Image (spheres, rainbow, N blue to C red):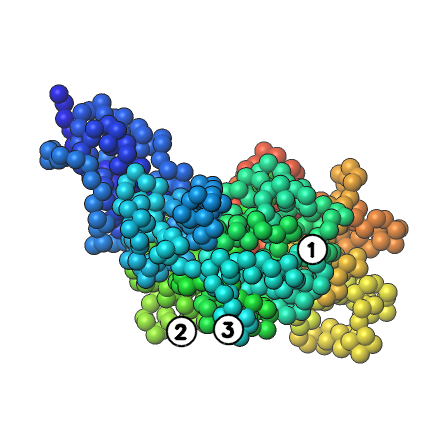
Amino acid sequence: MSLKRLKIQIQGTVQGVGFRPFVYRIAKEKNLKGFIRNNPEGVLIEVEGEEEDLKSFISDLKTKKPPLSEYTFFEIKEINLKNDKDFLILKSEEKGEKIALILPDIATCDECVKEIFDSENRRFNYPFTNCTNCGPRFSIIQNIPYDRKNTTMKIFKMCPECKEEYENPLERRFHAQPNACPVCGPYVYLTDSEGKLICKRKSAIEKTVQFLKEGKIIALKGIGGFQLLTNALSDKCVLELRKRKKRDEKPFAIMFKNIEHIKKYAFISEIEEKVLLSPQAPILIVKAKRNTDLSKYCAPDNPYIGVMIPYTPLHHLIMSKIDFPLICTSGNLTEEPIAFKNEEALSRLKNIADYFLMNNRPIERYIDDSVVKIINEKPVITRRARGYAPMPFILKKTLPQILALGPYLKNTIAISKFNRIIVSQHIGDLDNEKSFNAFKKVIEDFKKLFEFKPELIVCDAHPEYLSTKYGEEISKKENIPLIKVFHHHAHIASCMIENKTEEKVLGVSWDGTGYGRDGKIWGGEFLICDFKDFERFATFREFGLLGGDRAIKEPRRSAIGVLYEIFGEDIFDTDFEPVRSLSENEKKIFKSAYRKNLSIFRTTSAGRLFDAVSSILGLRQKITYEGQSAMMLEWLAENYKGNLNSFYDFEIKKYEYYVIDWILLFKGIIDDLKNKKEKSFIAYKFHLTLSEIIKKISEIAGNYKIILSGGVFQNKLLTELVFRKIKGKKVYMHSRIPPNDGGISVGQIIIGANLI
């Protein structure tokens, strides 16, 4: 008989996913002795027995692990025998450096869904049903390791039946930290907009359903904060919600009963169905079907809708009792963080919601719904939050402890510890006090949760960003070195990290706004770069924007800036759509400003070129949400059904770097308009021309891998055209890190680490 004892250290997603009972079961099956316990690094296993049984045990560990678990480190050492009599699950070890992964909040699993609809089950109709395979994680954890006493569930003492499940290694609720039932767990209750109690528990859900059927607006406390629900088929309901929430046209997410329900309203591919049914259960952007009974105000003038299915037991219970889809949008005023505390929600949302379906389970930190779209047959996260955050990006090398403060729009922060970059949930635009306060709270939260003490701070190079100013302030106050990183370099670095590329690349960094080395507004950049530095290889020809940031909300300003480059002052005597939209007084102001070069900001922004074309085609002169006019141009281009291979003329001129002169491009667009070409033809040809520009610059640059990053590459049509156009070179895009500014903090981390 050949006995051996092995010490196995595993890091990765191994806490809160049913990993210990899985190990316990396979050890028992193979008659092995020893123990498993959580520690700050992950899990430690010591196991002894026959050599053949140990080999089988290791094989099962690697091939039969729980569906939510992932390994990032797996080390086996042979140690001395201890002659244990049994295999045990030991109490978690809390000493040492905390590097265990914290799981995101996971959608309700099929087994739990069955239980809440089983009248014979003790969790029948219970809206907080969960197990080790699902439920809240990140939103309730207060400390590592992930044990009940370190979560907001510690205030609920388990009843004998729940405790027995929790302590039984053969139960799927073994050490499920949010484990609860109607006897011992949290409960829901319904109030009016003043906080006056109406009813509790089952009655609260039934009354909520009644109010939704009556066309009311409900504020529902979900996993990571409050959501606003109302009937998505009713124009009256949707318009009232828009009015109260102050959200003019930006699309609302819509919750449906199930995939079959969605298919009545949208086209769903196999990959889209897989994303919707995944444990992350994000909002997914899909093509809407025409002529359905969905209110046109859910997504005005938009061929796409954001769809989701129930991902909590409470959502399942509500959706099972109604036969219409629900608007399910963030519980906030537009652009503010979502409310996640009961008192705060009543204060902030009382003028929006008619009733509040609340509960007495505290949320430790807010987290919004994630948003995903399919581009080039890959899921691309455009807002990384519930279901994904704070899963880290694992590197091959160890980094110093770095705090990255992210950008101004779509802010996330990130930290590095050991070989991991941990990105926060989506915070949002730092353009109001509530968002900026949320930004600071997330930083403090990460410091505490991950026992993180920054050795370096990295921020954007833009001197006026609030995140930059905050970085300067804490750098000085706490005597921590500060590095400023250029926006477009960070974009490319974030995509390089995701695609595990470290050598120099040709980065195509296209977005709306970013601070450049020359102090101007960049946004149409081709950079030869690595993690340390970049060279501006090519860019678009500059044009002038009157009012700078105001142009973001007025595409006509971009159009007039472009047309002024071509026609000079004569533009103001033409009947181009952007000029016609100006009042006589506005014309005088614009003309004077351009003549005197007052408040004119020069830019190379690709995003603003999209705005210019959209304005010239008469699609939009002013917008009510970011990217609206560019998206309308993309949708128009998608309507073109011809077989077009030609593109507009453009020139590439060599100066200190290459400059793509778009004068001929815009003259071609103007000629096509005069010749009454279909606007969808013009829009498609514009997209095709941009893909051709990327192809030409890549040929000039030579044999580099091509990295696509920046908000422009949320454009499905353009991105897919680039992949089709470029042959013989590797082209990389985002998937797990947003291509927009939500990914900037990741790039800041890796650049900062390489500049120390």
In the structure shown, which secondary structural element does the residue marked by tag 1 occupy? loop
Q: Residue 559's quadrant in the figure?
A: bottom right
Mark-to-mark CA distance, 1 and 3: 29 Å
Task: Give residue 278's position: percent from left, percent from top.
Answer: 50, 42
- Percent of width and height locating residue 714: 60, 50
Give the residue drawn at x 28%, y 46%: 164
Pick whichever of labels 1 and 3 is earlier in the sequence.
3
Classify the position of the N terminus by image quarter: top left
Instruction: Give the residue number, with chain letter if any, for mark 2.
Output: 473
Give the total of numbered labels. 3
Q: Is residue 713 above or below residue 627?
A: above
Image quarter in which the C terminus is found: bottom left
Lateral position of residue 378 relative to residue 689, left or right: left
- The residue lying toward the viewer, choosing from 624 and 338, is 338
Measured Cα–Cα span from mark 2 to mark 1: 49 Å
The residue carrying mark 1 is: 233
Name which residue lies at 13% across and 35% down.
84
Residue beneath disc 3: 196
Say which label, 3 or 2, has the lower sequence index: 3
The image's mark for residue 657 is: none
Seen at 61% across and 34% down, the residue is 727
Q: How busy is the neighbourhood of tag 1: few (under 14 within 10 Å), some, or many (20 plus)?
A: many
Amino acid type, residue under disc 2 in the picture: Glu
